[in-house]
Image (cartoon, rainbow, N blue to C red):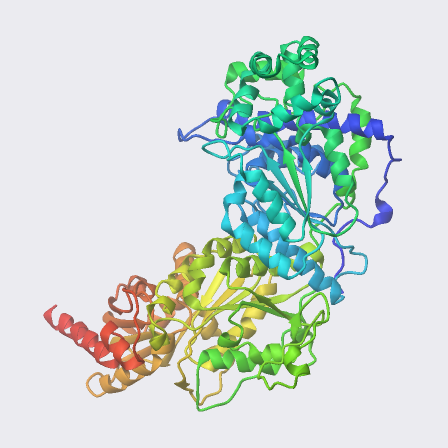
Amino acid sequence: MAAFSSRPASSITRPAPLAESDTLALLKALERKVLWLSSWMIHNANHLRANRDGLKVGGHQASSASVATLLTALYFDVLRPEDRVAVKPHASPVYHAIQYLLGRQSREKLERFRALGGAQSYPSRSKDGDDVDFSTGSVGLGVAVTSFAALVQDYVHLKGLTPEAQPRGRMVAVVGDAELDEGNVFEALLEGWKHDVRNLWWVIDYNRQSLDTVVSDRLFGRIDALFDMMGWRVVTLKYGKALEAAFAGPDGDALRQWIDACPNSLYSALVFKGGEGWRKHLEGDLGQLPGIRGFLAAHDDASLARVMTNLAGHDMAAVLEAFHGIADDRPTCFIAYTIKGFGLPFAGHKDNHAGLMNEEQMASFRRAMAIPDGAEWDRFAGLKLPPETIERFLAGVAFAGRSVRRLTAPAVAIPEALPLPRAARMSTQEGFGRILNDIAAEDSELARRIVTCSPDVTVSTNLGGWVNRRGVFDRREREDVFRDEKVISAQRWQMSPKGQHIELGIAEHNLFLLLAALGLSAPLFGARLLPIGTLYDPFISRGLDALNYACYQDARFMVVATPSGITLAPEGGAHQSIGTPLIGMAQDGLAAFEPAFVDELAVLLRWGFLHLQAEEGGSVYLRLSTRPLEQPQRTIDPALAADIIAGGYWLKPPSPGADLAIVFTGAVAPEAIAAHEMLLEDIPSAGLLAVTSADRLHAGWVEGARSGEASHASRLLAPLAPDAAMVTVIDAHPATLSWLGAVAQHRVFPLGVEHFGQSGDIPDLYRVYGLDSDAILAAAARACLGKIRQ
């Protein structure tokens, strides 16, 4: 079982709880401090720090201000250590200010906000050091991943994989309302409904302003209805205590109706204009009512502005009441009405998204916050409460009660060799399914820790055998109607909490977000999983943003993408991938492979399971094919296995000083082998190089150039003559292999696919796209002719 990497509970000294009124006063003071620190952090980065390149530093003072109350309430009062939070990207300064007050962030990093080594522009698990749970940046992804994290939490708890002392936590997303324009949020919402996710909160910062404009008035009604339809509880935080008191006064119903009917654009404009603007409109629209005249007479302009902007999302008492009013695990959406830029001079202005306070405005803001010169970074400057009182309160904050919230889990032992299916002809896709099926038959720790998922292509990516043996995960036991009705089916998909396959709808974004959550299970929940996701190779592009997001968080998972390339043949261009190997090469945190033979695949799968768990490891992408190939009859020794993992090996070694080599990857192996055999009659020294990973080969070559050490690519090509030529061939874009000419300045004649695919059989398509043996021989002839001319 995994264990917490944290202080023992007995070592934590917790002060006695405060009275409710004292807690509210302290939270309001901390809210004020959070607003100051987040605003000052951005101001310092833009106006006081040296700007050597002249580029705008930026930051989001207005977007930060709108969630200062919400995040203060969450982190200082509501959250527990087991809760996990995705903070909206533009609230990064508020998040870092809170962590600074909790002692989890340094002043130096705040001073270097958006600079090298400083607090990141957007919260980042891998770049920030203050315990970010989920990276955010590409809007909508941080929201959606919390839904899948809730599903993963259920998965590991129902299987008893978590540490005994680890309670279920809430997965919380603080959501900018403009993020709800992102389609992946609603894809995740629907998938979450299908899987009955629990312990999930989405807190919508409903400030009704996006980057460029004011959000449509009609959005709220749709949000409310949509979440309700998906089985969520919807809690609307609209009016604060001061406004509610005004509504309770004479003609208060008319005031409420006026605000309810006020268009978002007008409300925002009046927020910016202040008390005088509010008074003018209220007098013009409701001045005939004696209660409203009395209400206006009771307030000067400053006081009137405070009351009219008293939305619940900025009222600490209202926020706490709403959050603490939820005691069950039902997914809950809080729609918190807020004001973008609340408390700042450009509050409500439609252009405030990237707005920054100038020096004069900041000086005025500093005076309002009672911050002495030189005390800008002081944790308690400007607060009326004694510092020791605040320190005592912070020491008792439940969220910070555990010194380290990133958990650890023991590595899963991987056998010295995985089961190797034997057949004269086999595709790598079939081999993958058979290897997993054999693992599933074992009662091993490896088998228990693998979890698979697929976007409705489980059977067609050869996961059927695994699922038949291991079942489909569901929070409840589900009946198999076909089995009960004695209808014969190859798929025996028992659905229960014991299942180890998570079936998804056709949405690749959801697949990669689920893989991100599964791949973070060890640090989030203390449970080691080995996730494998399968999809059709061309549709990696459909989920690419989410794949990049998952890798950016250092989530650990395996993507098995199959079938691939024009080799898919009759399926046609809509299902034929071209650029995916280049994606694999370019994607940080992802080691990409394309084996030709099943014995290579077995080696790479084993290495992949180790790589997922290595401290300096990462995720793995296997590009497979449905094309059956003749399998080599050989035993892979440790040296050959190391070459396969490093990216390539000589299937037919060249003679020393050889003038020509054919280099191939993946399913085109038969054409490369046939062309090589024909070449040997005229060029007996020619070699045949199998590249299993252009990605690993290229990465090793680049690293070797930096370090001055020989790379695997340079060692492989060393037997060739200095003026030798290489013909490279791959069922993908030719740039995947054409860079090999730069390793030792050899001439390269690259073959590959540069245009959309089409329907046909393999011989026709390989001929049309120049991947067949004739095309390889023609390229070899050009290479030889070019050397003669030289």
- Vertical comparison of 19 with 147: above or below: above
Instruction: Point out the image quarter for the C terminus.
Output: bottom left
Q: Quadrant of residue 570?
A: bottom left
Residue sitting nearer the eye, 86 or 509: 509
Height in image: 12 above or below 187? above
Q: Is residue 556 visible?
A: yes
Q: Quadrant of residue 90?
A: top right
Closer to us: 395 or 635: 395
Q: Residue at x 23, y 71 (%)?
A: 725
- Residue at point 54%, 73% (across, down): 458
In the image, is residue 283 above or below residue 317? above
- Point out residue 500 in the picture as x, y percentages from the top left corner: 65, 71
**Which residue is at the far right?**
16
- Establish if 702 lies above or below 593: above
Looking at the image, which residue is at 85% across and 45% down? 11
Q: Position of residue 789 (x, y in %)?
A: 10, 70
655 relative position to 261: left or right? left
Q: Is residue 137 visible?
A: no
Residue that appears at 27% across and 76% down: 765
As rendered, which of 121 and 201 lies closer to the eye?
201
